[in-house]
Image: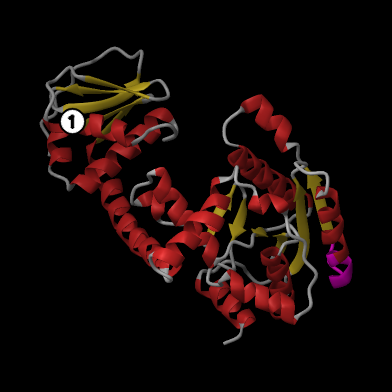
Amino acid sequence: MNLAERVQRTIEVHRLLRRDDRILIAVSGGVDSVALAHLLLRLRSGHRWTLQLGHVDHGLRPESRREAEHVQRLGARWQVPVLVEMVDVAAVHRREGGSLEEVARRLRYDALLRLARACHADAIAVAHTRDDQAETVLMRLVRGAGLAGTAGMPYARPLEERRLVRPLLDCWRQELETCVRAEDLPTVEDPSNHDPRFLRNRIRHQLLPLLEREYNPQIKELLIQWMMVSEAASAYVAGEAARCFRRLARRDGRRVSLALPGLRRQAVAVQQAVLRLALAEAKGDLRQVGFQHWQEVASLLHERPAGSVVDLPGGVRAVKQEGSLAIEPALATVEIVTYNQR
């Protein structure tokens, strides 16, 4: 099976794209994205897709304009329209702070969404590979992610009202390099892909080569296997937790109360997942909530007396009551609720 046939199989198995879809292909000009555009062009006629190229100039380097011009030349060669948008990552980073890598990623997806709307695309195709998947899993492990956090990137996900799809997730980067050379496709290398300020680059160019060389040459494949196990286990736990949450949760505005007797009877993994659902509902997200916070909340289930409180990031707290555990805004008053259930 050649590379185009494998990409076709990935698209079919994961239902990434439909017949007659309008697709915006995110093209940086590098090997992976040029290979993605080439392969979707080869498959286009069998699906009656309408293809357009989208390029986001992050404005971080003087030579970035040449990369946009390179993508425009590719579009002319393939007779495919090209849309370009420039975003000022540095200015936003100065204003907001945080990780430059995360700011660039957010602005890139925001820009791709605007371009997709401008050309009425149904889906946005990005060129993440099997290597990117392995790097993502290792990066999340290094950052301390749990089971759900190491499940990897999905083949498709919503991006507001559009679909973000990853048709190359079953392809290794080396295969794409071979394809690009064989087809004599011009590419440009983004120097920021080697910038050690970005954690992903340090994972890609330093940590993974060290692990391959000194510990296990198959480390990337093992990370993919770990991801697949994590996905299966995480999906099972998530299903159990959702059923448990529906049964045990009571809501009052932003306050979520969980019946303690029923929660205590669940497996630890399900307990943690239920607590995550309650916190996500009360807080709106799970940002800044680390392992230590989960340990402190878990201590309320068995060890600490009623009236105990754990303060959490984002202006919420966990409060143990007689028969219940409440996740609520930090300024809420404690109302004692007695549960007879479950």
Q: Is residue 81 left or right of residue 208?
A: right
Whether the magenta-drawn stretch holds residue 80 is answered as yes
Residue 133: x %, y % from top left: 50, 61
Residue 11: x %, y % from top left: 57, 72
Which residue is painted at 17% across and 17% down in the image? 307
Which residue is painted at 36% across and 63% down in the image? 226
The correct choice, above or below, for 178 with respect to 324 in the image is below
Residue 58 appears in the picture as rendered: yes
Give the magenta-colored segment's residue range: 74-81
User: Which residue is labeled 1 in the image?
Assistant: 299
Which residue is painted at 40% across and 20% down in the image? 315
Mark 1: which amino acid?
A: Ser
Tell me the quarter of the picture where residue 128 sits. Answer: bottom right
Which residue is painted at 37% across and 44% down in the image? 144
Query: Label 1: few (<14), some or many (≥20) within 10 Å?
Result: some
Spot the residue most to the front. 214
Main SS of residues in magenta: helix
> Toward the viewer: 51 or 193?
193
**Quadrant location of the N terminus?**
bottom right
> What secondary structure is found at the residue carrying circle 1?
helix
Q: How is the image coloured?
A: secondary structure
Residue 303: x %, y % from top left: 11, 28
Residue 250: x %, y % from top left: 27, 31
Spot the residue most to the bottom. 1
Q: What is the number of callouts on the image?
A: 1
The correct choice, above or below, for 65 with respect to 154 in the image is above
Residue 134 appears in the picture as rendered: no
Whether the magenta-drawn stretch holds residue 98 is answered as no
Q: Is residue 340 left or right of residue 105?
A: left
Q: Is residue 230 left or right of residue 48?
A: left
